[in-house]
Amino acid sequence: MNVFRGGGVLLAARQPVAVYSLDLSSKGFNDLQFTDLLGVKCSLGQVSLYIFVVYIQPGACTDEFELLFDLLGNLPDLYNRRVIIVGDFNISDYDFTSSRASNCSRKSSILQNFLQFGEYQQYNNVGNINGRCLDLVISNFNCTVQKSADPMLKEDNHHPSLLITSTIRDNKLKHINTNNSQPKQWNFRKADFPSLYKSINDTDWSSLKNIHNVNTACSYLYDKINTAINSHVPKSSYRRNSNFPSWFTPVIIGKLKRKWKLLRKFRQTGNTETHDEFKRIRTEIKKDVKTAYSSYISDERDTPLAVGTFDLGGACALHLKKRAPSACRIAA
């Protein structure tokens, strides 16, 4: 994005937080003329958080706000993710003490529509020297915003330093990596199965009988299996052809597109029937996604394609399958 005088955005993270920059160049964000925007994915263990830092010029027109919030609202990568959007939005008449969009400017109304339809909330209630709130903290999870008692830089009276805190548990939003660029995975279509079968059959499994701890035995077993698979099954990088998660059905994708059209239509017309239809479809999508995700996980776990069976010294039977990352299933 372009950097304007008085603007520019920066985000810094401490180790061991992993930070991955989001490529927004191909999603229409380059059409923003008066906005600086940075988007990143921050990960710590199993917890991930999407952060956007924004600066909008004071003279930006309402079309700029509509485009920005429309682009953010339609990013498929953010579906069912923790998201926080912070920055200087320069909406001088924004009433941070009220969630109502009535009797406010067009820019404030656009913001309120984004908060309502995206199920976000604006958490900053710290006013500046003029009692205004130019810096907003928008999030879809609970957080606390207060004036920082120890600013890192000399404080601007129009932009008080803020301290944002939140407690995030790793089981709040379950997700699977949906990036187009996926880690390398075993490509069983190119596997040397005869050599793989021979390698597993030639493995000495007698040590399993002397291991009495179940977890230790499983670790030993899988180490041997994975070693054999890595030796005879190449790995390939897969690139997704869709911006949607693999468990999204055509029906879900169709409803998502319908929802986005209704959102645009409501923003243009303010029609209450369009609003009600939008909310109805949004509720349906949530139920459909939950069902589709459960079915996807169940299918991956319970319907493997067996390609070989081996006797592990009487300890158990091993069934190899072509699908699923673990590549094996143990049956006593």
Image (spheres, helix red, strand yellow):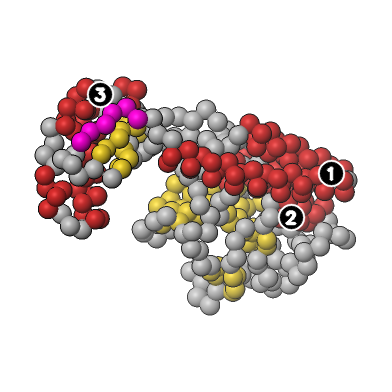
User: Residue under circle 1?
Assistant: 274
Q: Secondary structure at mark 3?
A: helix
The amino acid at mark 3 is: Phe
The picture quadrant where one finds residue 205 is: top left
Identify the image quadrant of the N terminus: top right
Q: Secondary structure at mark 1?
A: helix
Kindly identify the residue that appears in the image at 80 percent across and 54 percent down: 109
User: Residue under circle 3?
Assistant: 193
- Tell us which disc is closer to us: 2 or 1: 1
What percent of the width, then of the height, locates residue 156? 60, 68
Q: Main secondary structure of the magenta part?
A: strand
Residue 310 in view (yes/no) = yes
Looking at marks 3 and 2 on the same chain, the residue that comes earlier in the sequence is marked by 2
Identify the image quadrant of the C terminus: top left
What percent of the width, then of the height, locates residue 203? 13, 36
The amino acid at mark 1 is: Thr
How many angstroms separate mark 1 from mark 3 (CA)?
Answer: 56 Å
Q: Is residue 189 magenta?
A: no
